[in-house]
Amino acid sequence: MKSFFLIILFSLVICSGYSQQSNCVGSSEDDYGRRMQAGLIGFEYFNPIQGYQGVQYFNDWTKGEVILSNGDVIKDITLRYDKYLDALLWLRKFDIRTGIISKASISGFRLFDSKNQNKLLAFFIKKKIALSRSGSTDAFLQVLVSGEFSLYAYRNVNVISTTEYVLNDNTRYFISFSDQQYPLSLRRGSLLKIPVIKKAEMKAILRSNGIAINDEKDLISAINFYNKRKK
Amino acid sequence: MILKEKLKKYFSLILHHAHIMKFPILILYLIISLRLNAQAGHFDFYKHEKVYVHLNKLVYVAGESMRYKVYVVDIATPDQKPCSKILYFTLTGIKDKNVVNWRINLDDNPELSYFKIPGDIKPGMYILNAYTNWMRNDPSDIFSQNLLILSLSQATPNALMVTGSADTTIIRPVSPVHNDYALKVRTAKNSFAVNEKVQMEVSMSSGHLDTVKANLSISVSIKTPFNEILEDKDIESSLHVSSGPGGQPTASDKVGMVKRDVNVAPKIHMMEDKAFALSGRIKNRKDSSLLVNGQILVSVIDTVAPHIIYSHTDSSGRFLIYISKLYDNKELYLQIVGQSRNTDYIWEFDNKMFDPGHQIFKPYIVKSDEIVFLNSVNNMRLVEAVYANPPKRNSVTPFLTGENFFSPPDLTVFPSDYVDLVNFKEIAENIVPLIKFTMRNNEYNLQIINSKSSNWFESKTLLLNGVPFTDLAYLATLGTKDIRRIEVITTNFFIGEMTRPALLSIYTTDGKVPELYIKNNTVVYKNTVITNGIGAEFNSVDSTSMSREHLPDFRNDLYWNPDVTISNKKNLLIEFPASLLTGLFTIKIQGLTLDGFPVSATASFEVKE
C-alpha cells in the first residue's frame, strides 16, 4: 500500500511539473510548430566538400528545436549542423531533402540525442564573433557553460591544403562576459590572460580542484567553478 | 494554487478508481490519461480569459477618437500574462446593425490605444464588444459596453433602440468583491470654478502585503443623464468570478478571483496564443468543390526583405495561416500555386466577429433633459473641432522588416549602372547572363540556369517586389529605368513543399505590382491592426501637458491618463484644468495590481461658474 501511494505521488509530481513548464502550453503549440516547419524557406543543401576525410558534421541527423529570431520555436524537426559551412541543415519531411535554414532568421537551436532518451545533446546560439581581423560575423556557437562567464565553442573545420582532401579541426573557444567575447585556447596560460578573469582567483580554483586545462572538460570545469566562487 | 487544484482533482479520481480497479490497471490508467491530457492540449481547458476595457467616456460624436485601455487576465492564473495574443473589437449599432471592427495585438506594451470613430457613422446606441478568439467559446466572457454615438451631420433620433431587459450583460449590478486591496481617490474640494485647476489624490493600501503596486488608467468626464441605458462597467465586476457557494470568494482566495472555472464545453474557437490565425476554405467557383491539398502562397510587397508564407489546404479544403506581426498593416496577397487566375476560386475567410445571437430590443424615449445634454455634447464637439489645436501625432511606428528569405543571391544586378536598355529582353541579353528571355509563338519565355546541373530551366514564376508574379508580358516592358535591382538564384530553392530549380527576383523603382495583376491573380487581405502603446496615443497621455490650451475650452472629458503606476508607499497627486463646461464630473480609476487583481475607485466633483 505504501509503494502504491509513492508511485501515485511520483506520477502527480511529474504531471504538475509538466503542466507548469509554461502558462501557455496549448493545443496550437504543436500545430503552429508543424506549420512553421512545413513552410520553411531556404536553399537546398549541396555538400561542397564531398569525399573529404574528417568530421564535417557535428551530429548525425537528430531531433531538434529551432529558435526563431522572434522567439518562436519550431519543435520536432530533424537537424544536423555542418561545421564546414557553419550552417544548420534541416531534413524536409515531405521528400527527405536537405535544406539550409537561413542563419538570419534564427537565434539558436537545440539538438537532442535520440539514442539517449532525447537528452540535450547540444545547444547553439547565434553570436557575433571576430574570426578574422576583417571584422565580426554571425556564427553558431555551442554553449558549454552558461552563467556570468559563459563559455562557447565555435565548432569549425577547414581545409588547409586543397590537394590532400582532409578536414582540419578548427574549433575555437570564447569566454563571454557582459556581452563581450574573449577568444582563448585550451591552455592554462590562455585562460589566465583573459582580462575580465581575476588571475589570482582562477589560479586558486585550478590549484584547489586539480585542473590542468588539458582538454575541453577541464576548461568547462574551471569556468563552472569560477562562476560559483564566492565574491 | 494550480498544483493544489491538480492534486485535489487527481486524488479524487484515484480514490474513486481504487475501489473498482486493480492496482496495475490503475497505474496504467493514470499514465495514459496524463499522456492524453498533455497531447490534446488539455491545459487549454483551464484557460479562462476575461477582458475589461476602460474607455475615456461613454458618449462620443462621430469622428472623435475613442481612447481606451485594455485589461486582459486569465482568471485561472491572474498573475501571469494571458496567452492570447490578439484582441478583437466590434462596435455594433443596435438599430441598424452596422458594424465597425478592428483588432490589436496583446503584446508586452500596455494595451492602450485609440480608435477614430468613422465620421459617417449613424447616430444612435452602439455596443462595444472586446474579446479574444478564445472568449468566443463562452460569450459571457466577452466584454460588452453600451455607448452613445452622436453625429454633427445627422440628428440623434428621439427614440433610441436599447437592448431589452432579457439581456443581463447590459445592466448588471456590480457585485461586491471581497479583497484586501483598497484604491481611493479624493479631490481637494467638492466643487471647482471653470478653468480652475482640479487637484486629486489617489492612494492605495493592502491589508496583507507590505508593498503593493498597480497599473491604473484614469478618466475624468462629464456625468451623463443616461444612467438607465449607459451603465458604466467596472473592472472589478467585469473581471471577477465568484467562487464560493454563495458567490462570495473565500478569504484564502486572496485575490477573490483565483478560481479554476473549468469549463469542459467543447472549444470550437482556437486560442490565438502564437499569432493572428487567418483561416477559411477555398471553393471552386463553378461546382463549389473544395480545394483539397492546394498550395497557398502569402506575400506582401517588400523591396528590401521579401518574405513569403507557404501553407496549404487540408483534406477538407480548409487552410490556417499564422500571420506574425511582421505582416501587420500590410496588404497580404494570397495565391494558389498553379492557378494563374484566382477568379476560378472563392476564398471564404472565417469571420471572427462576435455574434451576440438573438437579442431583444426596445425603444427608449429620450427625455427632455437628456436631449439638452446631447445637444450640448454636439455643440461642444463643434466648438472643439473648430478651436482645438490639431493633435500632435507621434511618429508612426515603422513597419517591421524581417530577414530577406531569398538571400544571398548568386547574382545581383543594378541596371542603373549600365547604359539605357529599353526592355527586359535587352536587359537579359546584355547585363544578366544567367537568364534567357525570349519570345516564341507570341509567348514570352523565361529561362534561368541552375548552376549545379548546368541546365536551363523554364521559369513561369518570378518575384516582382516580393510578390510571386507570372505576367511575363508585363516583365517584357520593363527597361533599365524601371528596374532598381535584379537578383538571380541559380540553385535549388525550397519554398515549403515546393522546390524551384532557380529564382528571379525583380525590384522596380516604383515598388509596385500592377493593379490588374493583383485583381486577377491574387486575393487581397487587408491586415489592419491598431497600434498599441503610448506611441499610438496622441494628445492623450496627460491633459495638463496637452496642447489643449485654446479658447474657448469646452471639453467634456477633462483628463485621460491610461498608464499610471501607483504603490501603497506613495500617493499620486494629479492636477488638471477644468474647462468652461459646468456640471458634474466623474473620476473613474481602474487598474490591476501586479498580481492581477482588479482595483477601482470613483469620485465626483462639480464645476461651477
Image: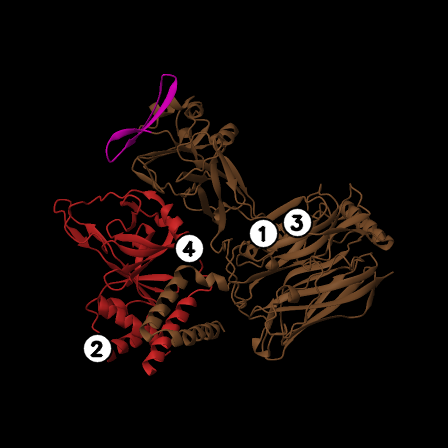
Q: Mark 2 to mark 1: distance in Å?
A: 63 Å
- Tell whether A73 sits left or right of A100: right
Which residue sits at x=44%, y=23%?
B477
Q: Which residues make up the magenta segment?
A: B434-458
Q: Mark 3 and mark 4 in contact (Cβ < 8 Å)?
A: no
Per the image, label 3 sits on a secondary structure element best described as strand
Secondary element type, mark 2: loop
The answer to whether A68 is drawn above or below residue B482 in the figure is below
Q: Secondary structure at mark 1?
A: strand
Which residue carries the number 3 mark? B91
User: Horizontal placement of A135 versus A209: left or right?
Assistant: right
Report how far apart the C-alphas of labels 3 and 1 lie in the structure.
10 Å
Q: Which residue is mark 2?
A: A210
Identify the chain of the residue marked 4, using the numbered disc in the image: A
Real-space CA distance between mark 2 and mark 3, rounded to the nearest whole angstrom: 72 Å
Amino acid bearing label 1: Tyr
Which residue is drawn at the image coordinates 61% and 74% (left, top)?
B245
Q: Which mark is residue A72?
A: 4
Q: Residues within 10 Å of mark 3 (few under 14, many from 20)?
A: many
Judged by depth in the image, the label closer to the viewer, 4 or 2, is 4
The label on residue B297 is none
Tell me the distance, in whole angstroms, between the alpha carbons under discs 4 and 2: 42 Å
